Amino acid sequence: MLRFVVLSLFLVAISVNAQSLKLNTITAKGGVIMPESPWDTGFLVGAEADMGEVFNGFVLVPLVTYWSTGYTYSGTTFDLSLSNIQLGADVHYSLDNVAPGLYAGGGLAFNFLTSEYPVFNYTTFQFDQTGSDTETKLGFAVLAGYNLKLGNMAGVVQGRYNIVDGFDTLELTLGILFDMAK
């Protein structure tokens, strides 16, 4: 219930200030995902869009991210895999008074989690079939990042901690910003 109330207030606040929103930059990002144990470190790719200020100093950043990870039981011949498509929105707050380019924030996202696992075949007495489960979970995130210059381009380094019911992850990403305001 608390998640629903927070999400509702967030959406109302954004809609009140929607007149001033426009696409400023798009960020293509890649990096690593570090889920809770026992899952292995995986990879992620994604994109974000800077839509401008929704409040004084708070920037709206919709995002889409895909990541995948796995887990191998020691002493066995089968693997588990887990992937996620994350759709959400963050709010970034500039900390330029601390260090130019530094920001912190948080956000909400829908996580479309898919797990694949081996299924024991009682005919062959082997794990030669695959099963899968999919579930959607709402998650929260806290993050910090730093905008930097990469030659003639701009980049961003970001750390993000995702809090999803029963499954938390840490993301470390590097992104390239494409200026859309020109």
Image (cartoon, rainbow, N blue to C red):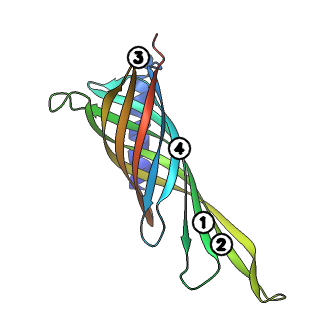
Marks 4 and 2, how far apart in space? 23 Å
- Residue 102, image x, y percentages: 25, 33
Marks 4 and 1, how far apart in space? 17 Å
Q: How many marks?
A: 4
Mark 1 and mark 2 in contact? Answer it, CB < 8 Å.
Answer: yes
Residue type indicated by callout 2:
Tyr
Q: Circle 3: is it few (<14), some (14-19), or many (20+) Cα within 10 Å?
A: few
Marks 3 and 2, how far apart in space? 47 Å
Point 26% across, 29% down: residue: 101
- Residue 103, image x, y percentages: 27, 35
Residue type indicated by callout 3:
Ser
Q: Which residue is mark 3?
A: 20
Q: Which residue is mark 4?
A: 45
Sequence-wise first label, 4 or 2: 4
Point 41% across, 39% down: residue: 174
Answer whether residue 122 is visible to the viewer in this image.
yes
Q: Which residue is mark 2?
A: 117
Residue type indicated by callout 4:
Val
Point 31% across, 29% down: residue: 148
Pick the quarter of the image with the N terminus.
Answer: bottom left
Q: Circle 4: is it few (<14), some (14-19), or many (20+) Cα within 10 Å?
A: some
Residue type indicated by callout 1:
Ser
Sequence-wise first label, 3 or 4: 3
